[in-house]
Image (spheres, rainbow, N blue to C red):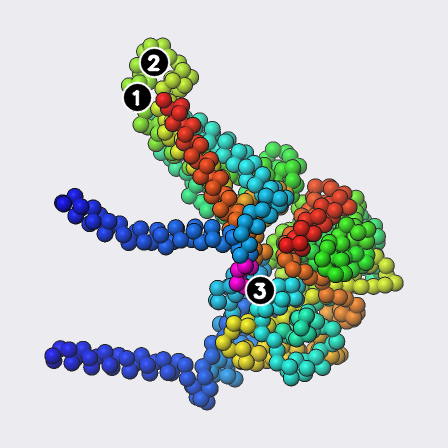
Amino acid sequence: MTRALRALIVATAALVGITACGSSNDNASKGGAENVKLTFWTHTHPPMIELNKKLISEYEAKHPNVKIAYEQIPNTEFATKMLTALSNGSGPDIINMDDVALRGEYIPKNLLAPMDAAAASKAEAAYVPGTLDGAKGSDGKLYGLPTEFNATAFAINKKHFEDAGLDPSKPPATWAEVATMGEKLVAAGHEGFNFLYLHSGWYTQQLQTLLNETGGSILTPDGTKSALAQPQSVQALQIWNDLIRKDKVGNADTASREATVPFDDFASGRRSMTMIYPWAVAQLKADNPDVYKQMEVVPLPQVDPAKPTGRWYGYYMAVNKASKHQAEAWKFIQFVTSEHDRWLTDVNFVQPVVGWENSPAAKADVPFLNVWAKAYSEGKFDEVAPHYSEIQDEIKSAVERTIFDGQAPAASLQEASKAIDQILAG
Amino acid sequence: MARAARNRTGLAFALPALALFALFAVYPMLRVVYLSLFDYNLTSPGRYVGLENYRFLIHDARFHAAFGASIFYVVAAYVPAVLLALLIALGLNTRMRGSGLVRLLYFAPVATSWVAVSVIWRLVLHPEGALNRTLGLHVNWLSSSGSARWAVALTAVWKEVGFFVIIFLAGLQNVPRELHEAASLDGAGAVTRLRYITLPLIKPVTAVVAVMAVIRGFQSFSAQVVLTDGSFGTEVVNLFIYKTAFANARMGRASAVAVMMFALLALVTLAQLRVFRRTDR
């Protein structure tokens, strides 16, 4: 009896202890607010990761009841890991995702929590019209705020131009000029120009850039069929094909295929010209300061310089619909995305708030500001469709058949169209 | 009575292992069969579609290509690997000095992970890599439909030979030396002894090797991911299943492929074992 009584006392004491621990974990710390642990996932981009970590510690210092677990996932695995995690309930509270995935997969599948109407309306007023469309659903609701918003431009290596007897102040304005200048750069011992051969997303975005210029399209306007076999779409792949296979301004076989350092060939000083995005400038500067000094960012070459166009894409922070801390998650997102100047100065990420290009931070810290400001004024978001990742796979295969195996662009895109029609059918 | 008690004790000891096997092997397999009847995208409840996933796959060009890539890989990688392994095992089945070290060297690639091996071979197979430089070639091994499949097969031969060498060696060391000595006294040459003594006596080992070669070939995944990401005709069935399930979120369709491959491999294995049993008589 005595032993049983002793055991009961010990058990009760243990229970009280556990309960006390539990309550200190769940309830208020100093200010009485509930303790919250948020999880936050992004892809890998070193300057972005550094700033995110700083912002997290600042936010945690201001909100002692909030702890944020920040995880970075390699770009090539990001979509797969996110989708799998969301399916088994282990997904993060806060998602940083590109607009194609948001519009193509996450919003239609009802995986995200929309911003409340008042906050969304405030955001609409603060950002350049159209730039939040990358995180809008067909219901018109806003599902994310941008951490970065990208337009496409072109980078040249001025020293390579001088080596080849070209004038760096007269960069190529058309793809035809990329070909002629590229041939001279090759003759001077450099790789003139090349596209990037990374994963299917990269293949698709580069083809989309050319499609925007030729007036082609991946899908028909109603989104139910492929439009890749149409003449203007074929023209886009023809440009790619002619540059690499006919004019031989670059070698696709020896191009770097490392998606974590996409601009490695340009950064290493091997390649003379490349398409480029604002975020890549900071990475390039960090990777090779010497090449950075030789670099000039110029407008994207055009099929028709009289009607310039480009491609927009963005990464948005969004909230998992299954999150138990949606309000806290949105508060954190609003904090992170309100630091416009630091995103510009530390990472070269443009957040398209109205007048961003006139801010002192932009003027002081954004190299090639005029080029970027122009690029931001003439782009459009990518097309999306159900099962878009499969469509991207087909586009990658089509480009590879043409560029690496030599199949004619029309035949290759015809084959891709057939496969895409089947994907869209179910 | 005593026997029944013994059986019960045995069963009790086996029960934890059987329970784990049922939970982690049998249940997932049955679950895959069940899922193959649904249209399930990971994030929404599945919709029952009967045999629709199977019907789709029968007409799907990408699945046909993946199946063809797997067959090519099994034949192009494992037939040479097994033949080469047999030759090497015959050569190593002696009591020469240092044969232990040589065996260890052959086994080293087997002990290395597929990913590490593939990363090494990606460098070797680069257009400016060691293979082209050594042989004076200009082949784009990993970026052309004409050569990528062969390049992946070549990598697999290098990686897998050692595994089969060890199995063949174990079989060869069980062949009684007296038989070889007696045959030599009767005037039988090396080829005759190989044909009439060695090969018949290692037939059970050869059967195991053949079955394992087919299974390992169809399980291939990492080499294709690292070397080509499935481009240029190297998207084998396992990679197709992975992309269908996790990148494209078509879990039901991926499950249907898995079920079909399980059935096919079971049939092929049974056929192989039957062939070896028949020739054994």
Check disc 1 and give the amino acid type.
Arg
Residue placed under numbered mark 1 in the picture? B177
Check disc 2 and give the amino acid type.
Ser
Q: Could you tell me how far apart the alpha carbons at marks 3 and 2 are, in whole angstroms?
A: 68 Å
Residue in the foreground of this view, choosing between A144 and A282: A144
Q: Chain of mark 2?
A: B
Image quarter in which the C terminus of chain B is found? top left
Q: Earlier in the sequence, mark 1 or mark 2?
A: 1
Check disc 3 and give the amino acid type.
His
Residue A43 is marked as: 3
Write the residue at 74% across / 73% down: A130
Residue projecting furthest to the left = A1
Residue projecting furthest to the bottom = A31
Residue placed under numbered mark 2 in the picture? B184
In the displayed structure image, the side of residue A378 where residue A259 appears, left or right: left
Q: Specify whether residue A277 is in view.
A: yes
Q: Could you tell me how far apart the alpha carbons at marks 3 and 1 are, in whole angstroms?
A: 62 Å
The magenta segment is B41-47
Residue A300 screen position, x and y as percent = 78, 61
Q: Is residue A215 above or below residue A125?
A: above
Write the residue at 75% across / 76% down: A129
